Image (cartoon, rainbow, N blue to C red):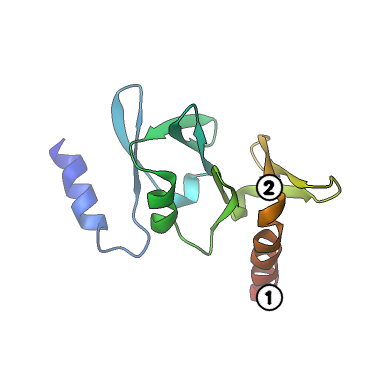
Amino acid sequence: MDNIIHAIENNLNDEYPLIVCQRDNVTELLSQRDITRVYVEARRVRICAGKEVYESNKSLSFLEQQLNPDRFIRISRFEIANIRKIACFDFSTAGTVYIRFDDGSVTWAARRYVRAIQQALDRIEAGRE
């Protein structure tokens, strides 16, 4: 437990801290690079990293403030996605956007977040030029 507290204290001053989460009654620290998405399911905040699913005691809004805005975007009222883990978008369905992640998992973005998604994609593309 002391190691966890020490790691948290060391990362408090980091620009983008590790994310504290739980799985099987064990507290773990996740690098933001490993997180695919953060979402609410059954009134619990879940964090996907690869094939693993963790839980957080923090709210989705709190985690959104902790996550790197160059990497994470809000895609619905209940979900935040790591844009660098997204394999493809399908904008052809009216009202929603189909999203497939590089690990094969899928989700949908709400229509009201399409503009923010497109702006994030534009920022990424501008950074590559």
**Label 2 crowd (10 A; few <14 / some 14-19 / many >=20):** some
Query: Toward which corner of the image does residue 83 lie, by quadrant?
Result: bottom right
Q: Residue at x 42, y 50 (%)?
A: 61
Would you name the residue on which mark 2 appears? 110
Count of numbered badges drawn on the protein: 2
Quadrant of the rendered image containing residue 125: bottom right
- Across and down, in percent, residue 112 comes to 68, 55
Question: To which quarter of the image does residue 105 belong?
Answer: top right
Residue ID for mark 1 = 126
**Amino acid at dot 1:** Ala
Q: Secondary structure at mark 2?
A: strand
* Residue 63 image offset from top left, x and y in percent: 40, 50
Residue at x-position 26% and y-position 56%: 11
- Residue type highlighted by circle 2: Ala
Secondary-structure class at tag 1: helix
Sequence-first tag of 1 and 2? 2
Q: Is residue 1 left or right of residue 73?
A: left
Residue 94 at x, y percent in the picture: 84, 47
Query: Is 46 on the left-hand or right-hand side of 84?
Result: left
